[in-house]
Image: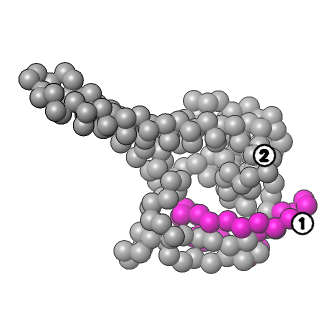
Amino acid sequence: MAYPLPGFVSGILATQPNPPRQVSIAAVARTVLVGADGALYAGGGAFLIAFGLSVFVWPNTPASNIPGGLVMAGAGVLCGLVAVFRIWQVAGALRHGDAEVAEVVDAEVGRARLPGMPWGEPLRIRMVYMAARGTYLLTSSGETGGYYMQQRWALALQPGARIWVLRNHGRDVLYAPVSQPTGAS
């Protein structure tokens, strides 16, 4: 699976629906970093840092190349920080966020707004990047909201399907399929 985060979140919420939840930062980091997006940001960041810093250790490097090396290393740090931010965001939402079961009211699949959004899998189907969008109804409060996901599992959502909506400070952070407890920790 190119994006294991929804399954991981679903397992956690099935066994621990109410905060505070016991979730290790190492488990969150591992799950985020093995996903296509997390691996791309972390791996790309490491590559850019290494390549940019190699300018300093390469013998006889012209001084004119040093600013370019610093820019590449800086871009690498920014890429790495994107991955660190996502780990921090997911861990915080899982530990302390509100998790509510929602019923999908409206669901459609179409072209992605921007291919390769920061969080999701690159869903190329016949050379077109796909995304799922729709609305949901929170079963506990009756509140409605909208979702947009570039994740393979979301393409199969139909009206009546149930999903987890994980919120932190009133903002949707993650969506995950409702599943049976899997013992994830």
Can you say which quadrant of the picture contains the C terminus? Answer: top right
Residue, disc 2: 169
**On the picture, is 164 further left or further right than 26?**
right
Determine contact: label 2, label 1, CB under 8 Å: no
Q: Residue 125, image x and y in percent? A: 42, 73
Q: How is the image coloured?
A: one colour
Q: Nearer the viewer, mark 2 or mark 1?
A: 2
| Residue at image location 47% in from the left, 44% down from the top | 38
Question: Total label count?
Answer: 2
Q: Residue 26, image x and y in percent? A: 57, 29
Vertically, is 102 above or below 126? Answer: above
Which SS class for mark 2?
Answer: loop
User: Is 148 contained in the magenta span?
Assistant: yes
**On the picture, is 121 further left or further right than 55?**
right
Q: Give the range drawn in magenta.
A: 136-160
Q: Residue 79, image x and y in percent? A: 43, 41
| Residue at image location 66% in from the left, 47% down from the top | 9
Amino acid carrying mark 2 in the image:
His
Which SS class for mark 1?
Answer: loop
Residue 142 tag number: 1
Which residue occupies the foreground of this view, 16 or 63?
A: 63
User: Is 33 contained in the magenta span?
Assistant: no
Amino acid carrying mark 1 in the image:
Gly
Residue 180 in view: no
Q: How far apart are marks 2 and 1 (CA)?
A: 18 Å
Label 1 packing within 10 angstroms: few (<14), some (14-19), many (20+): few
